[in-house]
Image (cartoon, rainbow, N blue to C red):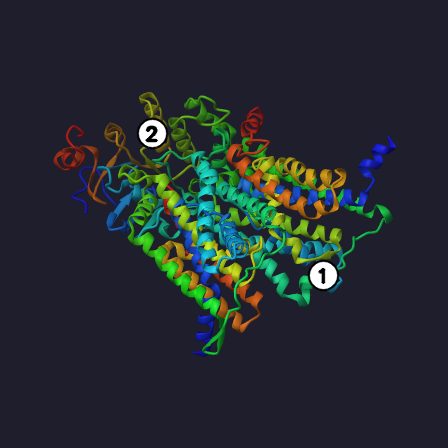
Amino acid sequence: MSEGNGQGTEGGAAAPGRAVIRIRGLTKSFGDQTVVHVDDLVLGAQPVEGLIGPNGAGKTTLMRLIMRSTRADTGSVTLDDGASEVALSKLAPHRIASLGVVKTNQVTQDFAGLTIWDSLLLAVAQRRDERPHRIYRERHLVERYGEEIQSYLDVFEFSEPGGFAHSTGEKKLLDLIRCLLLNPKILLLDEPTAGLPEDVTAQVIELLRAKVAAGMSVIIVEHDLDVIWGFSDVVHFMAEGDVILEGDPDYIRAHSTVVEKYLGSGHV
Amino acid sequence: MSAVWDFLFGSPAFLIFGTYTLMMIVGLGILLHLQLGVTGIGNFGVAGFWGAGLYSFGILQVHYDVGFWLALLAATAAGGVLGVVTGWVIADLDDDGVLAATLAVASIVFLAIESERGITGGRVGLGTIDFPFDVGERTDLAWLAILFGVTGVLLWYARRVHRSPYGRLLIATGTNEPLARSLRKPAKRTKVGVMALTSAGMGALGGLYGPIVHFLFPTQLTVAITVSVITALVLGGQQRPLGAFVGALLTVGLFDIVIKLYVPLPRDLLEHAFPVTKQVIFGALLIFVLLFRPLGFLGRMRRETHVKGLTRV
Amino acid sequence: MDFIAKAVIIGLTEQAPLVLAAMGMALIYNLSKVINVAFAETITLGAYFAQWVNVFFGASFYLSLAVSGILAGALSCATYLVVFRTAERRGVGAVEVIIISLGLSVLLRYALQFVFGYEARFFETPPPTFLKLFDVGFTSFQLTAFILVVVLALLFYLFVQKTVWGRQVRALASDADLAKVSGINPLLTTLVMWFMAGAAGGLAGAFWGVASSAKPGLGWDRFLLTLLVVLVGGTRGLRGVILAGMGTGVLLSALKLEIAPLRAEIVLLVAFILVLKLRGNRFRELAKV
């Protein structure tokens, strides 16, 4: 149940040409504990939407439910691009990613054994490149996508760009670049800057702004609320598995009593 | 000089048979490398896929007089179909489930051969199967050359896979399947595909083994084959295409060729103690290598050298 | 009705050791998350130990049984300490641990032939009486084995569910760190459990062995079925394993009443594969992507 939409936002109405994720009656429990129960929610109507709330509010689980890396108990998630509506909650995870809904990971994820370049070439490779008989396809892949990959590696500094990602921070950046290389319509970011130094965080936000300007939508979960207030067009405040408040950052900050009740003082 | 020649090649039939076995283990090991070392699928039923090919080939040749090429195609198809079914079953399973399912598939093949005596001959055996050509005394040598060629092609393919987007997809699926899926990679289809492809290869190798033994028995398909292949691959290095080759030389090459042919062991020792000792050593090797040098003799994949080569383009 | 009665009687008397073996394997699986292929050899050696005590010392089968259980339990602990604990400490991956246990299985299966000889070894027991129930014949021996297995299975079940040790085992299995904090000695608890598991496997082997003979392939030939029972029934705890084991025995004997024995085994394996496929992967939810 949301308390209101605040100024300047029209929850549910997509900006022209912008695909949105519609969530209806979505629930997920682990044992006796209900972690997510969202009756009705539209994500992605605005270019950048923040998702905040206390630990255990269900933010990460909600994102995992959208990506179907965990299965919902009830409810549906659909992708609406204005022309048609596709039920994401009936698709396999790789199909969801193919439709342009992609997520970065809160817990650092990497492919053991794959180098940075490997990982990025994997992201850009299409299914036709990855057939078992295409054993000479590598050169084509590098020629086609090499520059694009290099452009990302020019932005962020890796200690050994030709080798493996070593630190958690490097793996986090690699995760983000992999997702960006998929050219997503909607990018879900789960704490993308956690553990990154300030200057790198600024670089990440700048890169994301450029992508948003080019038409990508971002839904971001972030504990650093400065990032949220400065970056988001709309903020959804989640507590106890549901969105209880949504509106633009000023509107949310104006409801300091609600926010502080969950996040403690000093956050607004 | 001629004494040395006689010592080395004095009993060519045994030497050739030992080398056949070696080539089979290398070939199967390269295919298992693609399953286990690259895609992380622990196939413990290698003997089943190989045996499905071997018996399909034998049945068609013995009972239906089918020509060599068609029978070999059928052997490949039999391995492939079994691979698709197995891949479909294991796509959702964890490692324990994969162990159970692949062992079960091998068991089913074995039981089917023992039970369907009408077409497989059961324990009585099935034969005879001959070489598809006859060049006199040198026929078995020519067949060995063909086996060398086939193994060479498998090795070449495995090395190419490491340098292709397909190989990268397999590695990604094997090391972090959920992450691969989130990057648009159809993990289940990939697993079914690699099982189909490599099991078809195992089936084809089975078909090529038919003419070597002339007579097929279910006892040729016991877990000993699987253990030999796994031992060779693990010892050599499961992540490297050459791993099976190096490992097979150090195991089968040493035991079935060097010791059997060139070390004068008393006959009763050769019959009982020797094969038992060989298995004890294989078992011990598996334990020690995986505990203390898990990536075997050759070590880990060297992806960074491949990437360096690429980015210089 | 007659058919069902026959299937149940044959299934339970012939496959009673399967329940015991599966319980042993499940104990290890649930606590250490290890599928131990070498458990096959614990079964085999159980048969050899019992046969040795029975023939060499002229002991009765029941005394041999007790000694065999203790020796197999000790062997199981030794394999844990020497191999699996080392693997655990070195952080060896899941597939690799399975391969290591396969190596251990091969090593033991062949090494035991140096000790006990290459040929099958037979027990020296008084000839059994033949009994009949619902027109189904079975030996007094099979009946005793069945009753003993039921009693042992019950004792095992009570041990794991009701005793302090059992509670510690379960606590360790569900949260190792928490268990350590609450004062449980993980090594001792783990060893007790591996001992119990080994004893169960050894006893199963002794029952199987006395019905035919002690031979190197005894455990391996029954490993796959035991593993499938553990994987299918294990998700529901020991009770699930007992039920799956008994169900498997009855189903197999029912199939064998209808079709050729080898074909019956094929049908059973296909059924198990389908169950595994339909049940899917229990650990999938752990993926944090």
- Asked if residue A251 lies left or right of residue A199, the reply is left
| Residue receiving disc 1 | B126
How many numbered discs?
2
* Circle 1 residues within 10 Å: few <14, some 14–19, many ≥20: many
> Which is more toward the observer, B27 or B262?
B262
Residue A34 appearing in the image: yes
Q: Secondary structure at mark 2?
A: helix
| Residue receiving disc 2 | A209
Q: Amino acid at mark 1?
A: Leu
* Circle 2 residues within 10 Å: few <14, some 14–19, many ≥20: some
- Asked if residue B263 lies left or right of residue A235, the reply is right
Contact between labelled residues 1 and 2, with CB atoms less than 8 Å apart: no
Query: Badge 1 sits on which subunit?
Result: B
Q: Residue at x 67, y 51 (%)?
A: B206
Q: Quadrant of the C terminus of chain C?
A: top left
Q: Position of residue C51 (x, y in %)?
A: 53, 56
Q: Secondary structure at mark 1?
A: strand
- Asked if residue A137 lies left or right of residue B93, the reply is right
Q: Compute the Cα span from label 2 to label 1.
A: 71 Å
Residue A168: which disc? none
> Which is more toward the observer, B26 or C147?
C147
Q: Quadrant of the N terminus of chain C?
A: bottom left
Q: Position of residue A162 (x, y in %)?
A: 51, 24
Q: Amino acid at mark 2?
A: Arg
Q: Residue at x 35, y 27 (%)?
A: A204
Vertical placement of residue A224 versus C266, above or below: above
Of discs 2 and 1, which sits in the foreground?
1
Query: Badge 2 sits on which subunit?
Result: A
- In the picture as drawn, the residue positioned furthest to the left comes out as A257
> Which is more toward the observer, C20 or C128?
C128
